[in-house]
Each structure stands twice: as C-alpha cells, then as structure tokens.
Image (cartoon, rainbow, N blue to C red):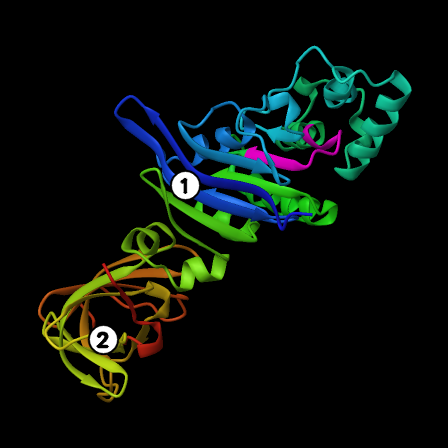
Amino acid sequence: MPDYMIELRNITKRYGDIVANANVDLSIRRGELMTLLGPSGCGKTTALRCITGQITPDEGQVFIDGVDVTNVPTHRRELGMVFQNFALFPHMTVHDNVGFPLMIRGLSQDQRGEMVMDTLRLIHMETYAEHYPRQLSGGQQQRVGLARALVYRPKVLLLDEPLSNLDAKLREEMRFEIRELISRLGITAVYVTHDQAEALAIADRVAVMNEGRIEQIGTPDEIYECPQSKFVADFIGLSNFLQGQVISLEGGLAVVEMGGVRLMVPAEAETQVGQGLLVFIRPNDIDLLPADHEEAENVFGAVVDKLTYLGDKIDYRLTVGEGLPLRVQTDGKVRLEVGAEVKVRLPEPHCRVIIE
C-alpha cells in the first residue's frame, strides 16, 4: 500500500502566457487533511482541479492511491467534492440530494436508503431527511453538501472554499465540525481556502501557494512560527519586518543595526558582518514595558503613534529609535494614550531571520 494517497508530481498548467501551476510537487498522506492556502490567483484551485480531473496538466502526473490518474476522467477517481455554493438540487429533499450520487451509480433504493440515513446520522441531520434546501439554514445546507460527498465513501474528500458563503460565526463553527468529522472517518482530504485562520485551525499540514508555486509545506505551527520566506511570514498572521545590517557576531547571535537601534537576533551559519538581514517578529511577541523600565538587551524606547481597540486586544503603532515603525498587540489590560513614551522588548528567540 502506498504511503501517500495523493501525489502531484511536477505539475505545470498554463493558460496562454499565464502559468497557473509551475512544477508543483505535493504528497498527501493517507488520512491527512491538507490545506492549500494562498491569495486569489495563486494556483490553489488549479491544483485541486488537477486532482479532480477537471483539468489535465500540461506537464506532470497525478497519482491517487498509487495509481496514475492523470488522464482518468473525474467520475472514475473515487472522489467526493464539496463546493462553496452548496450545489444542492432545490426540487429534491435532503434525503434525495444525499442519495443522488448513489442513484447515478445504480444502487438499489433499499441500499441507497440505508447509506443515506447512515450518512445523515453522521452529520446529525437525520431528522431533516424530508426537508427541502430552502427550509434549511446555510450551515445545514453545507452539512447536506458534505453528506452527499461522503455517502459513497470516497477515497478522497475535496473541499473548495466550502465555508466562504457562511457568516463569520457559522464559518468558525463549521470548520471544527468538518475537522472532527474527517478525523472520525479517517479519510484523506484536501481543503482549499484563502483564509489563514481557517487553514491553521483545520489542517494537519498546510501548503502555502504563491504565483503558481508552493512556497512552503508544514504543520500549522511550523508555517506560523518558522516561515521560510517573506511572503509566507506576511501572508500568515501579522508581522513586523525590520531591515538592518549585521555589525558584529557574538556567540551565535548577530547584532543588527536598524533605525538607530541595535537588535540581537539568532545568526545563521552563513551570516557575515556587513550583510543585510531581514528580521521579522510577530506583534504579539513584543513586550510593552513602562517608560522607566531599565535598559536591557533588545529593550528600546518608543512612542505611541496610534492605537486601535480590537475588543480582546489593542493594536499599537509605535515609533522606535530613529523612525523605525513597529506594531505591537497586547491583551488590553493596560491602555496607553497616543504620544505616550514606553519601552518595548523584542525577545531574541522571537526575532527570526528570513534569508531572501
């Protein structure tokens, strides 16, 4: 049995002069939920459609369960698909919508009935079997779409922006339901989204895409904590990017001068004095300190330029040193005024160097 349920090998797809996918390599393990994440036009939907068979790549191969399916039609790939627009038949009941894939596969009415009700119980919708889509909420309609994709027990479940038509609160509820259901079934799933929070919450691993290429693949914490490019650091969460020059190396640390301050950051093996470095640090990793806090390593004076109240936190825009802008987020227990003088600590372990 192959280790991977899905493999994209050197997939390239062009539309005229536009390269939608450029040499994409992706291996998805059995029972894994892989999220394809990126902005509009990054190539994630093209990659998904290469898996479904809706698109044939110009170069490369698609494997499902160890079999080359590059030229196999969609209906023979044993896939379940969930779409962002629900795609339910309005004239059919919930029961008939879910049973439709079984009907076109020629299963008997008795077989269909048993499998449909088993699947509706799985999503806690068995009492809605005789309802029509118009009688359901958006979340209930999405559950029915999910049930229809799962009813014939496909090898792979593919979800294309499945929650984009729901409101924010319902999206949050549904993503945890989908995560729990996929885990319970042990099915392999590919989930396409542009929503960073959704990707981090739902995935076993995330593939971040940009301009037709995969920038980085990793677990949610690897993607967030250790981005390998400025694009990934900027796209996933909030970041401060600080450009400076290495003025000395001290015991595995580099002293970087930027905006009139000297910042200690972890040094890579190839770091050299005089080299320019791009350092990034998350706003929530910076400590906001009183103005009279004693001087220490990576502690600098700053002035509050702007603050934004965000409910559970406050977002501060500060100026450090000689015009160095810095964004800091705190839990809001202490609120500072615009113009206040403070100090900030940029903890060295949270200052990460991006090699460009």
Q: Quadrant of the C terminus?
A: bottom left
Q: Residues within 10 Å of mark 2 (few under 14, many from 20)?
A: some
* Image location (x, y in percent) of residue 165: 51, 30
In the shown orientation, is residue 216 left or right of residue 93?
left
Q: Residue at x 25, y 63 (%)?
A: 355
Q: Which residues are magenta?
A: 149-159
What residue is disc 1 on?
Answer: 24
* Image location (x, y in percent) of residue 128: 78, 26
Q: Is residue 209 above or below residue 279?
A: above
283 magenta-colored: no
| Residue type, mark 2 in image | Val
Cα distance in 3D space between marks 1 and 2: 47 Å
Q: Are marks 1 and 2 in contact (CB under 8 Å)?
A: no
In the shown orientation, is residue 47 left or right of residue 183?
left
What numbered label is drawn on residue 342?
2
Decide which of 58, 324 is in the foreground and name it.
58
Q: Residue at x 69, y 28 (%)?
A: 144
Label 1 vs 2, first from the N-terminus: 1
Decide which of 299, 45 is in the foreground and name it.
45
157 magenta-colored: yes
